[in-house]
Structures are given as structure tokens and as C-alpha cells.
Image: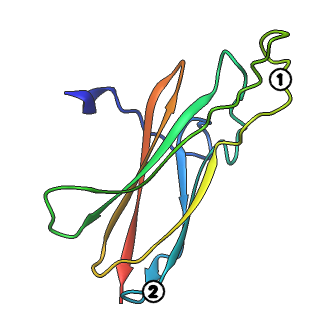
Amino acid sequence: MLSEFVKSADWKSEKHVPVIECDATVKAGEPLAITVSVGKEIAHPNTTNHHIAWIALHYVPAGAKTSIEIARCEFSSHGAAVEGPDKGPAYTCSAVTVSAKFAASGTLYATAYCNIHGLWASEKQVVVA
């Protein structure tokens, strides 16, 4: 099972954990801005050799047996250049903001992939009023 390789921890003390930031309550059908970032308290490196490759956001309505993928963002620029590693002119930041509408309460799940330290996850409950 892949789940045995997914790591989780307190994002305040572990730089790999994706942090989900959004209101905890939203009205049905109204847009909810959701930001997912990695390295909020402790910066995660963004180098050619060590970086966050992607973040994915899933939603599981209460009582559901499957998840709904809300968004997936790949971070493609980590300083690689013709001149060599970490000499490039652009570096992506490991953060993404999306907007989604929900009809039912449920749980947001964020996963982030570090090219060296693997898959990390976190979750946050959302109540639809």
C-alpha cells in the first residue's frame, strides 16, 4: 500500500508538510479560497537537487468513499540552467491558491512531493453551512 509511505507531521516543526489555509466554514455554493504551501514555518529548499515537485489537493465529502481531485500544481523551475545547477534565472515557489465551491461538508487533503524525501500529507475539515 502506498499509504504506508505517506509522511505527516506538525508543519510548524517539519518543512515538508503541506499547509492548508482556508476558512473552516463556507456557505454552500460560495467560492472558498484555499492556499496550500510547503515550508510555511521552516523554509524548504528549492534547488535543482532538492525541491518540491508538486502539490495536489483532494476533497472527500462527509460519508463519501472516494476523493475528488480539486487541483494539482507542478513546480517546474528549480534553478537549472545551461550554466549548471542552481544558476538559472527562475525558481518557482511551493505554494498554490485555488478557489472551489462545495455543496457538502468534508475534508480537504493536501499532498506534496519532495524529490528527495517523498510524499507528505495533511488534512483540514471544511464545514458547509
Relative to residue 124, is residue 113 depicted above or below?
A: above
Q: Please tell me the numbered disc located at residue 88.
A: 1
Residue for point 15% across, 68% down: 63
Q: Position of residue 43 (x, y in %)?
A: 73, 37
The Cα atoms of the two marked residues, 1 and 2, are separated by 41 Å
User: Which callout, 1 or 2, points to the residue nearer the camera?
Assistant: 1
Q: Secondary structure at mark 2?
A: loop
Q: For this view, does 52 lie left or right of residue 57?
A: right
Q: Which residue is mark 2?
A: 30
Tell me, yes or no, whether the two marked residues, 1 and 2, touch with CB atoms within 8 Å: no
Q: Position of residue 91 (x, y in %)?
A: 76, 34
Looking at the picture, tell me which residue is in the foreground, 52 or 85.
Answer: 85
Q: For this view, does 84 lie left or right of residue 14?
A: right
Give the position of the N terminus as an image quadrant. top left
Residue for point 63% across, 49% down: 95
Q: Residue 69 occupies which quadrant of the picture?
A: bottom left
Q: Position of residue 73 (x, y in %)?
A: 52, 46
Q: Please tell me the numbered disc located at residue 69.
A: none
**Disc 2 crowd, CA 10 A, few/some/many (<14, 14-19, 20+):** few
Amino acid tagged 2:
Glu
Q: Position of residue 99 (x, y in %)?
A: 51, 70
Q: For this view, does 123 lie left or right of residue 112?
A: left
Residue for point 63% across, 27% down: 51
Amino acid tagged 1:
Gly
Q: Residue 120 occupies which quadrant of the picture?
A: top left
Looking at the picture, tell me which residue is in the foreground, 10 or 31.
Answer: 31
Give the position of the C terminus as an image quadrant. bottom left
Q: Secondary structure at mark 1?
A: loop
